[in-house]
Image: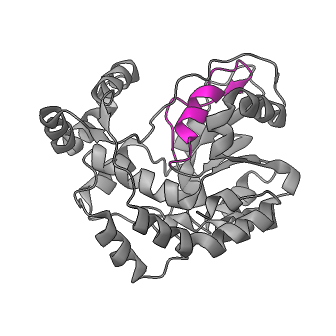
Amino acid sequence: MLPNFLVIGAGRSGTTSLHHYLGKHPGVYLPRVKSPSYFYCRDLGPSNDPRVRIVTRNFFVRDAAAYEALFDGVRDESAIGEVSPAYLASTAVPARIADRIPEARLIAILRNPVDRVYARYVARLRDGLEERGDFAAIVREERAEPLVRDDASGTYLAAGFCSHVLGSYFERFNRDRIKIHLFEDLRDDPARMMAETFAFLGVDASFPIDTKERHNASGGVIRNPLLRKVWTRSALLRARAQPYVPGWIRGPVSSAVKRDLDERPLDAELRAELASLYRAEIEKLQGMLNRDLSHWFA
């Protein structure tokens, strides 16, 4: 069985919360594993980065039969889907989805690219997945490379440019089969956003779900220095152990560790630089969505 809807991204825009909220509806079926990323990763070659190899092993589903098996548990749910933010990071993905699931419904959450890029950096720094402590240096390094890419997965700045990927979806799917939210919709009125999403998926839009808890928010780095050192230095060990530790254990432990965070606000001058860098991209998205995004310019 194949899904009939996909959440295509974007990363660090609330997709983990959306995954949890969707899973609370009796008419919606989601696999327990988020981000199988089949339509992104199926043709990827091996990586030399141990972190990438572990992510590939823990989450990515490359085999068609294994992907379809994710949905073996479907009973009487009418909306069958999965959440893979990598689907908005590659121009190759829309055609792959259109080829296998031409009638799929697609859901995206878009976020101010400045906030999204920096949130990704802070989250990776918090979890020991990023060792570079100077974000300004990362910006300088990435600005020396092309930023509009066919595959921007795993990047910071390039991942903020997604209008060309979104355009590929618009070329292959009827516009009424694509639902696009903003991060602000989820942040400011999640109940309304979920009701609209359920209606889009053809399930009971009035079904009440608890949207109070935010999942996998960036926040900042762990305030307690000893706990921060243990957590960040155990990143690879935790990743290797993840397949063997039940989610009902991992979730509460992760939440407890990240309960007290030290915020790391983005430097004002660097924010202004990034806002200028993304201005044309935001203008493109504004035209594509026919929605005012002027609040993203600053």
Name which residue lies at 75% across and 19% down: 76
Name which residue lies at 66% across and 57% down: 295
Q: Where is residue 274? Give x, y as percent.
A: 49, 69
Name which residue lies at 39% across and 18% down: 248
Name which residue lies at 48% across and 47% down: 61
From the viewer's perspective, is 226 left or right of 147?
A: left
From the viewer's perspective, is 66 left or right of 93?
A: left
Query: Does the magenta segment cover residue 18?
Result: yes
Residue 1 seen in the figure: no
Q: Nearer the viewer, residue 153 or 144?
A: 144
Q: Where is residue 37? Give x, y as percent.
A: 53, 50
From the viewer's perspective, is 91 left or right of 100?
A: left
Magenta span:
12-36
Task: Give the image quarter of residue 14.
Answer: top right
Residue furthest to the front in view is 268
Task: Give the image quarter of residue 30.
Answer: top right
Magenta span: predominant SS is loop
Question: Above or below — where is 30 with respect to 140?
Answer: above
**Quarter of the figure that contains the C terminus:** bottom right
Q: How is the image coloured?
A: one colour
Q: Where is residue 90? Give x, y as percent.
A: 57, 65
Query: Does the magenta segment cover residue 29?
Result: yes
**Quarter of the figure that contains the N terminus:** top right
Question: Above or below — where is 281 with respect to 184?
Answer: below
Q: How many marks?
A: 0
Question: Above or below — where is 273 with respect to 204?
Answer: below
Q: Where is residue 59? Give x, y as percent.
A: 43, 43
Residue 95 seen in the figure: yes
